[in-house]
Amino acid sequence: MFEPEFKDKVVVITGAAGVIGRWIVQGFARAGSRLVLSDHRPDVLAADARALGLPADRVLTHATQLQDAADIGRLVEATTARFGAPDIVVNNAGVYPSGFLLDIDTEEWDRIMDVNFRAPFIVSRDYARTMVKAGKSGSIVNISSGASRKMRTTVVPYCVSKTALDRLTKGFALELAPYRIRVNALEPGFAPGSEVSPLTEAHVKATSAAVPIGRPATAEDICNGVFYLCSSAASFVTGTTLSVDGGNSIGTTNVYQDKKTAL
């Protein structure tokens, strides 16, 4: 429905080799966008680009260390040198380690905050500067999580990072509105399969069973949400968060009584 709008648009996606990142890449590739794919695994990025049959003149891959502000700067420079200022930036990269607060060392805390919160700030700031300089309106989408509003034991640092990202989203939305750059967040549904933050089989089974709609997220679910936020249909939408999670963040369908259904 939204895909024709994105033909030839310049779209930057961080964490492009991850589960959700790959879905978003596939969606914009199908829409005919020009793609800037960022991840710390260049071999996976290159393989994905080949698998999608992306022409060399329509894709740029960059092995970005998001904990390094200078490397993010090199990503932005490479983008503008190839395609100019982007139309869309998707801050998708994130890490989801598990551990009790008393077991997490300072270095791990810093890594989580650097990738999940500090990097989206730097990426958004630096790309927004190029967009403003070029007089280009556009859209920034931060991939967040229902964890931003619901604390979970053993993933507290992740929850904190996503709460901070939510506030950053609103702050950028306020300050970039005069330049016609919209900034929103999308909270995707449960999507197991990450190689960077692997989950146990028990975790996957329990979490999937708790989703009110009864299934994990699909590529179509997530792409439709991102497409909407970046489209003209959302031209009056900024500073908001769209949950595309099958109701997972609003509560549980568990029934603690003998009678399990209403009918």
Image (tube, rainbow, N blue to C red):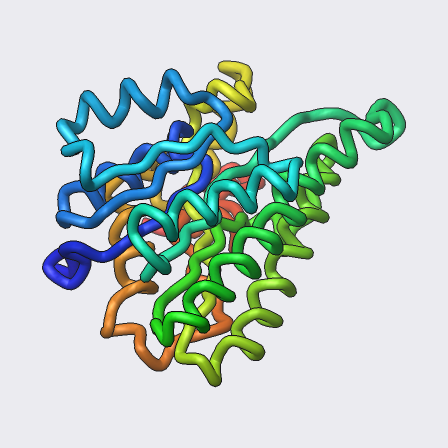
Apparent side of residue 32 relative to residue 127 in the rendered image (left or right): left
- Would residue 246 be visible to someone looking at this image? no
Quadrant of the rendered image containing residue 136: bottom left
Q: How many marks?
A: 0
**Residue 101 or 69: which is nearer the viewer?**
69
**Residue 166 or 168: which is nearer the viewer?**
168
Q: Residue at x 71, y 42 (%)?
A: 113
Apparent side of residue 17 relative to residue 249 in the rendered image (left or right): left
| In this view, 48 is above or below 221 | above
- Would residue 30 be visible to someone looking at this image? yes
x and y percent of residue 232 in the render? 24, 73
Q: Residue at x 44, y 71 (%)?
A: 133
| In this view, 40 is above or below 169 | above
Q: Residue furthest right?
A: 102
**Residue 4 or 212: which is nearer the viewer?**
4
Q: Residue at x 68, y 47 (%)?
A: 161
| In this view, 85 is above or below 32 | below
x and y percent of residue 1 in the render? 12, 59
x and y percent of residue 223 in the render? 27, 48
Quadrant of the rendered image containing residue 168: bottom right
Q: Residue furthest bottom?
A: 178
Q: Residue at x 53, y 19 (%)?
A: 198
**Residue 210 or 262: which is nearer the viewer?**
210
x and y percent of residue 86 in the render? 35, 58
| In this view, 190 is above or below 246 | above
